[in-house]
Amino acid sequence: MQVPDCSGLSLHGKHFALIAAAGGVQRGLSRNERYDVKSILDSSFRYTSSVETDLRKTFARIRRQQRTDQQAQAQVKAEAESHSKVRLLRQKAV
């Protein structure tokens, strides 16, 4: 890695110059783990004012969705493990 000349930069600027020289910031999330953010420009976006938002219901819905996702993942994992434990037996040729 070639270190850039940061002599005229502030400490903050030096920090970002070194990060850029090192190849930038790498996100630790895989493509499947990233969260899709809905844009305000998306036609399916509906604004809800804070007065009309019930946080208790929102968090309950999120928890239900997470439980469903975890159960589905556990089921897929259990099925994969059950298939990997099956061993084919072959008869010896007589």
Image (spheres, rainbow, N blue to C red):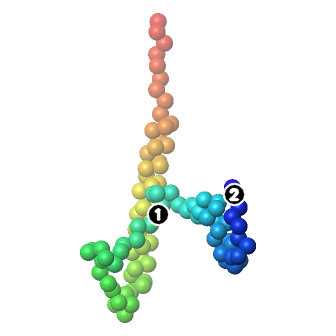
**Residue displayed at 46% across by 43% down:** 80
- Point out which mark residue 67 bears: none
Residue 71 at x, y percent in the picture: 44, 59
Could you classify mark 1 by the number of other residues whose Cα lies within 10 Å: few (under 14), some (14-19), or many (20 or more)? few
Identify the secondary structure beneath mark 2.
loop
Q: Nearer the viewer, residue 30 or 52?
A: 30
Identify the secondary structure beneath mark 1.
loop
**Residue displayed at 37% across by 93% down:** 51
**Residue displayed at 70% across by 70% down:** 6
**Residue displayed at 55% across by 62% down:** 27
Could you classify mark 2 by the number of other residues whose Cα lies within 10 Å: few (under 14), some (14-19), or many (20 or more)? few
CB under 8 Å between discs 1 and 2: no
Q: Residue furthest left?
A: 43
Cα separation, mark 1 vs mark 2, equals 31 Å
State the residue position of label 1: 34
* In this view, the mark in front (1 or 2): 2
Residue 88 at x, y percent in the picture: 46, 26
In this rendering, the answer to whether 68 lies above or below 13 is: above
Total labels drawn: 2
Q: Is residue 46 left or right of residue 70?
A: left
Task: Give whichever of discs 1 and 2 has the lower sequence position.
Answer: 2
Residue 9 at x, y percent in the picture: 69, 76
- Point out which mark residue 2 bears: 2
User: The residue under label 2 is which amino acid type?
Assistant: Gln
User: The residue under label 1 is which amino acid type?
Assistant: Arg
